[in-house]
């Protein structure tokens, strides 16, 4: 199966601290890849490096099977908090994003708002949005360029239960209908178990194990605990 | 690059900050002209039309700190890089936005002063000399744009960018006024102090404000050198920093 993301020996150092310590990762094309790890495991750092926001200290990575930076316009990402222009409405933010991508299509703005359930946001400026609405708009911005690869960092943060269900179904639909490869970094084992076709478990800047969903015997929770160690009996 | 510039310019024309800054410079310029009409001293038009340069640097520092500092702390820079823009393109676009902003502020203030000042004051120097002074003022604005675009690239976010920009503006202004007083007092080493004064955009603003341009070619050259240095440093810093 061709790989959408190939990472080999990736290292990222901040001063004396090592956020990524020789990490390897292989994301098959067309997968929904659940990236698991505890706080400080390096998930967000990894996604930042893949987006070109930070340069690795060592190692290599390739997107779309080619040069690490040549295909940047074919991906979308929402890393940590969504980046929104607070004094603009949702529609204006999307128009601005589409302009960056070289697209001028009002219908696309409307369809993205509708896709993420924001059609009623109206002229409200995003600085007055709830966390859940900001999260939805952030995802809409990430989808604006019809990406082939989507990176999402904790996308369910701030979403209510309906929002979580909505996002889960959206991810599945994008993967099924558009063949989009989606990497979801999350703490939420239950949510990932419902949608992911592949998993990567990180700890201390390293990939402990990568596996397909059908390779897991038992539950994801048991597998995670077995890999990361620790007795969780209360 | 074209679409990045289109997006940034679109953002600029819709920015209440930018529009407010232009309006503020118009009011400041009008205010300075009005104050000169109340002065008992007879002043020439050449001393009136560029008086706004005394506060221009502070206005540019605050505005560009807010405009560009926010990009670093609020994630807009992330959007641009993820969309496929290179860091050098992002920085050049920021620089162009800054230049357009500063030039528009300058021209708005200058035109206001001319419109209000011409009927009220006489020009005591040649039109050519005054145009030269205004031209140096224009280059000084470009220098300001480069400097206050570079500083946010060195800062972690909006608040720090504004604070450092303002501190730099005030510090340079105070230094420029002090050097100007040294020069007036004809203290030794005047030639060196003159060059130091002209090397700072605030120093040039002081000289433009006082209509005391003695070496326009040297000032223009220092403007271009300063602009180039700031552009190179800023592009290098943005090219190598980690973006959160």
Image (cartoon, coloured by chain):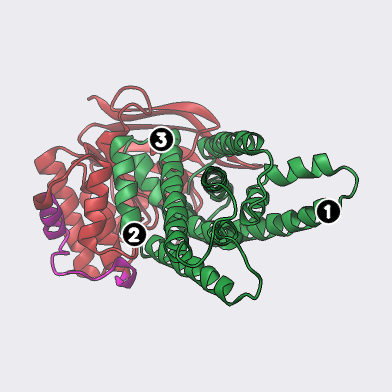
Chain colours: A red, B green
Q: Which residue is mark 1?
A: B182
**Which of labels 3 and 2 is toward the front?**
3
Task: Work out whether residue A222 or residue A18 is closer to the camera in this orientation and state it.
Answer: A18
Q: Is residue A33 visible from the viewing direction of this image?
A: no
Q: Residue furthest right?
A: B188
Q: In this picture, which residue range is highlighted in magenta?
A: A108-130
Q: Residue at x 67, y 46 (%)?
A: B200
Residues marked 1 and 2, same chain: no
Q: Quadrant of residue A168?
A: bottom left
How many residues crowd around disc 1 within 10 Å: few (fewer than 14), some, or many (20 or more)?
some
Mark 3 surroundings: few (<14), some (14-19) or many (≥20) residues within 10 A: some
Query: Is A116 drawn above or below residue B242 in the view shown?
Result: below
Relative to A23, does residue B73 appear above or below in the rendering? below
Marks 3 and 2 in Cβ contact (< 8 Å): no
* The N terminus of chain B lies in quadrant: top left
Q: Provide the secondary structure element on which disc 1 rests.
A: helix
How much space separates mark 3 and mark 1, taking CA atoms? 42 Å
Q: Give x and y (percent) for residue B49.
A: 53, 59
Q: Which residue is mark 3?
A: B89
Identify which residue is drawn at 24% across, 24% down.
A2
Determine which quarter of the picture holds residue A102.
top left
CA separation, marks 3 and 2?
A: 20 Å
**Which residue lies under the disc numbered 2?**
A85
- Chain ID of residue with mark 2: A
Q: Residues within 10 Å of mark 2 (few under 14, many from 20)?
A: many
Marks 1 and 2, Cα distance to the nearest angstrom? 47 Å
Is B113 displayed left or right of A125 in the figure?
right
**Can I make out residue B75 in this image?**
yes
Q: Secondary structure at mark 3?
A: helix
Residue B233 location, x and y as percent?
A: 59, 37
- Discs 3, 1: same chain: yes
């Amino acid at each position: 199966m061709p790989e959408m993301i190939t990472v080999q020996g990736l290292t990222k150092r901040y001063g004396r601290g090592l956020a990524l310590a020789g990490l390897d990762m292989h994301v098959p094309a067309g997968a929904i890849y659940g990236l698991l790890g505890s706080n400080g495991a390096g998930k967000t750092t990894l996604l930042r490096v893949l987006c070109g926001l930070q340069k690795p200290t060592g190692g290599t990575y390739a997107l779309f099977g080619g040069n690490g930076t040549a295909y940047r316009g074919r991906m979308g990402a929402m890393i940590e908090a969504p980046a929104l222009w607070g004094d603009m409405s949702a529609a204006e933010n999307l128009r601005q994003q589409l302009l960056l991508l070289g697209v001028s299509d009002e219908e696309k703005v409307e369809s993205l708002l509708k896709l993420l359930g924001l059609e009623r946001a109206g002229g409200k400026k995003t600085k007055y949005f709830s966390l859940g609405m900001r999260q939805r708009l952030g995802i809409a911005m990430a989808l604006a360029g019809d990406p082939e690869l989507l990176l999402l960092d904790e996308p369910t943060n701030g979403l209510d239960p309906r929002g979580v269900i909505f996002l889960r179904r959206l991810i599945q639909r994008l993967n099924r209908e558009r063949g989009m490869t989606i990497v979801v970094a999350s703490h939420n084992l239950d949510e990932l178990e419902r949608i992911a076709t592949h998993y990567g478990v990180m700890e201390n800047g390293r990939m402990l194990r990568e596996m397909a969903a059908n390779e897991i015997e038992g539950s994801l929770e048991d597998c995670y605990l077995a890999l990361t160690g620790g007795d969780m009996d209360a | 690059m074209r679409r990045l510039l289109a997006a940034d310019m679109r953002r600029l024309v819709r920015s209440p900050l930018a529009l407010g800054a232009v309006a503020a410079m118009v009011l400041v310029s009008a205010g300075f002209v009005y104050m000169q009409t109340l002065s008992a001293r007879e002043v020439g038009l050449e001393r009136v039309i560029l008086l706004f340069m005394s506060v221009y640097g502070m206005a540019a520092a605050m505005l560009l700190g807010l405009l560009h500092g926010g990009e670093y702390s609020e994630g807009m820079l992330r959007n641009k890089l993820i969309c496929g823009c290179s860091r050098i393109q992002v920085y050049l676009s920021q620089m162009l936005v800054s230049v357009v902003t500063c030039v528009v502020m300058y021209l708005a203030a200058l035109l206001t002063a001319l419109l209000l000042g011409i009927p009220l004051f006489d020009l005591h120097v040649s039109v050519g000399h005054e145009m030269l002074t205004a031209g140096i003022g224009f280059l000084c604005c470009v220098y300001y744009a480069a400097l206050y675009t570079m500083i946010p690239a060195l800062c972690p976010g909006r608040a720090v960018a504004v604070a450092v920009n303002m501190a730099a503006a005030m510090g340079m202004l105070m230094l420029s006024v002090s050097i100007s007083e040294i020069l007036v007092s004809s203290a030794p080493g005047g030639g060196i102090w003159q060059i130091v004064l002209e090397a700072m955009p605030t120093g040039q603003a002081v000289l433009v404000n006082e209509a005391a341009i003695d070496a326009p070619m040297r000032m223009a050259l220092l403007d271009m050198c300063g602009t180039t240095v700031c552009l190179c440093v800023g592009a290098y810093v943005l090219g190598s920093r980690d973006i959160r």
